């Protein structure tokens, strides 16, 4: 991704810039979750990734490792935990992250036409955006700011 465009809800351009103009050393990439997981897993020893595991409990051990206890009773001691467990993640909650916002992935059978840029839209109590993650897929999100939960 080379560029970011920020617009108001009525379509006015508020700011646009190339990432390299902001910082020459910066490189920005958007990666589809499936591709990221497959790439990470391909670089690790065969049985070091555990998919579809339901977490019961997580805690830091005295030596800095992380103890994961699964619903099936098994326990894992990990030096690194990569949290890819989706919405309402117990790991994200344990790490202190806020409640998730809904996001999606739009597919375009022939090709998406948005170009290599991050697109943000700001409005009153609203933030939305979309980012190409492949030649045919676009990640999107919408965040509403509300004075009360829900």
Image: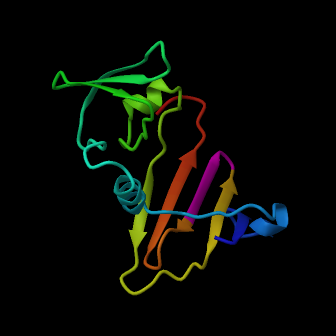
- Residue extending farthest front: 45
The residue positioned 59% from the left and 56% from the top of the image is: 128
Pick the residue in front: 133 or 14: 133
* 141 drawn magenta: no
Residue 128 lies within the magenta run: yes
The answer to which image quadrant residue 80 occupies is top left
> Does 91 sit left or right of 122 as displayed?
left
Residue 100 placement (x, y as % from top left): 47, 39
Point out the residue furthest to the bottom here.
110
| Secondary structure mainly formed by the magenta segment | strand
Q: Nearer the viewer, residue 29 or 25?
A: 25
View extreme (top): residue: 62
Residue 13 appears anywhere in the view? no
Which residue is pictured at 39% across the width and 44% down the height? 84
State the image quarter where residue 37 is shown.
Answer: bottom left
**x 65%, y 45%: residue:** 125
Q: Position of residue 17 (x, y in %)?
A: 79, 68
Residue 8: percent from left, percent from top: 72, 62
Which of these two is toward me, 100 or 62?
A: 62
Quadrant assignment, res 129? bottom right
**Residue ID at (68%, 56%):** 122
User: What stretch of residues is rendered in magenta?
Assistant: 124-130
Going by the image, does 107 lie left or right of 13? left
Residue 46 shown left or right of residue 129 in the figure: left
């Amino acid at each position: 991704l080379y560029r970011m465009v920020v617009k108001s809800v009525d379509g006015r351009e508020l700011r646009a810039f190339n990432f390299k103009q902001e910082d020459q050393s910066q490189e920005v990439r958007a990666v589809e979750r499936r591709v990221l997981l497959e790439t990470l897993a391909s670089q690790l020893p065969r049985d070091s990734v555990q998919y579809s595991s339901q977490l019961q409990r997580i805690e830091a051990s005295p030596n800095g490792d992380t103890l994961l206890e699964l619903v099936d009773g098994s326990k894992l001691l990990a030096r690194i935990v990569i949290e890819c467990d989706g919405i309402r993640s117990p790991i994200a909650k344990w790490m202190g992250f806020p409640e998730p916002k809904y996001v999606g992935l739009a597919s375009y059978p022939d090709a998406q036409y948005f170009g290599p840029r991050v697109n943000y839209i700001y409005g009153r109590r609203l933030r939305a955006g979309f980012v190409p993650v492949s030649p045919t897929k676009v990640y999107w999100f919408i965040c509403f700011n509300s004075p009360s939960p829900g």
